[in-house]
Amino acid sequence: MATRIPFGPQHPALKEPINFMCEVSDEKVLSVRPRLGYIHRGVEKLAENRTYNQNLYLIERICGICAFAHVTCFSQAVEEILNIEIPSRAKYIRTILAEMERIQNHFLWLGDVGHEMGFNTLFMYSWRDRELVLQLIENISGKRVNYAMNTIGGVRRDITSMIMPSLKEGLNHLEERAKYYTEMCTKDPTVLRRTVGVGMLSPSDALELCAVGPTIRASGIPRDVRADDPYAAYEEIPFKVITYDGRDVASRLMVRLDEVLESISIIRYALDNLPNGDVRVRVPRRVPKGEAVSLVEAPRGEDLHYVRADGTEKPVRVKVRAPTLANIPTLCKMLIGENIADIPVVIAGIDPCIACAERLVFVDTATRKRWMWNKQELRKYATKWYRKK
């Protein structure tokens, strides 16, 4: 007989609130129904009431781990509407920061998944090494988390010759540590028993459910925005898309560790071939009428921003589709057939950021019609409904 067991919204394995209502039988998950909406912040509506320059700081705070990816995606959309080309040096600097953010994200994820396995030594080690990445980012931008490096038309700060030696020295150390973790995760019995064959996702399911990022690449499918639709300087920098065909949490782990090594290679190439010239161009405060869709490969996968302008200093509409939202259907598929004890590891396997994925759904109980509205529209509808009552 099946039993319904809620996983979340408050659970020791969840860093942010989300609910997965699981039907289980004999410790096995039969079905999963997710529920969002616990920490909806209304970022898209807030963006409509701010200028494009003010939105750079708002968009950067969609996620503390993928901050640079989000603001790069937004900036590219506005630059497309403005029909401007940013300087080559700015493109390379954006690429360097994006790959540094990928490294620190993957080290953070490695610690989190180690914690969910009960392997807290791995958690401490990987987060210690992540500190070095944050220090390198701070050397460039002056900040550790929200870097404020991007601006519409380029970047705010340059990478000078004075800090290049420290960057290259730090990359050498990070490369050694990534190789160490790769060897350890392929031999350690704790990691192998908790990840191999856990959270299986077939290539056909990954494609059908539109998985993104390391989640789909761990199912053997080489889908990566950097290669499929190059942006910044990725068209000029040689790199390979990392894939594994194990289809489980172990493969997602190996994809990320190999991507750390590939990111280090990309950064080295960009530093050695950094073009001369300006790092930004001047742009008007008013953006002409138009719309654009921008894509970047965030550490968690494909990030999408849609911006529509009406000729003023503020956008008419900003729409964000973060990678975690795309991976939630695949997560539910991966949980089916797993033991209850493996749920935290499978969830951690997609590296979820719930605040990025949040949406608010309002249901009219009379017609059963569902809307995904922003807070202002919801308040207007709710006021009308209460007056009727």
Image: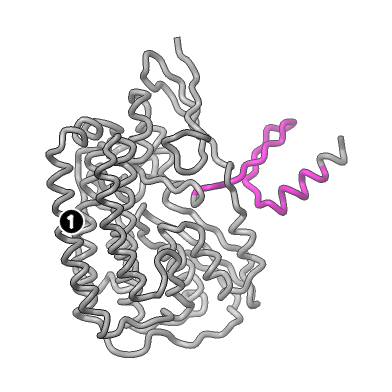
171 with respect to 98 (left or right): left
How has the structure been colored for display?
one colour
Magenta stretch bounds: 357-384
Q: Nearer the viewer, residue 24 or 158?
A: 158
Q: Is disc 1 placed on a helix, strand or loop?
A: helix
Q: Position of residue 43 (x, y in %)?
A: 59, 58
Residue drawn at x 44%, y 38% is: 14
Q: Position of residue 316 (x, y in %)?
A: 64, 67
Q: Is residue 235 magenta?
A: no
Q: Position of residue 185 (x, y in %)?
A: 17, 42
The verdict on residue 369 being magenta is yes
Query: Is residue 189 left or right of 345 when viewed as pictured?
Result: left
Identify whether 53 is placed above or below 42. Answer: below
Residue that mark 1 sits on: 177
Residue nearest the observer in this picture, 245 or 127: 127
Q: Where is 12 relative to 66, above or below?
A: above
The amino acid at mark 1 is Arg
Q: Is residue 190 left or right of residue 357?
A: left
Q: Is residue 79 left or right of residue 176?
A: right
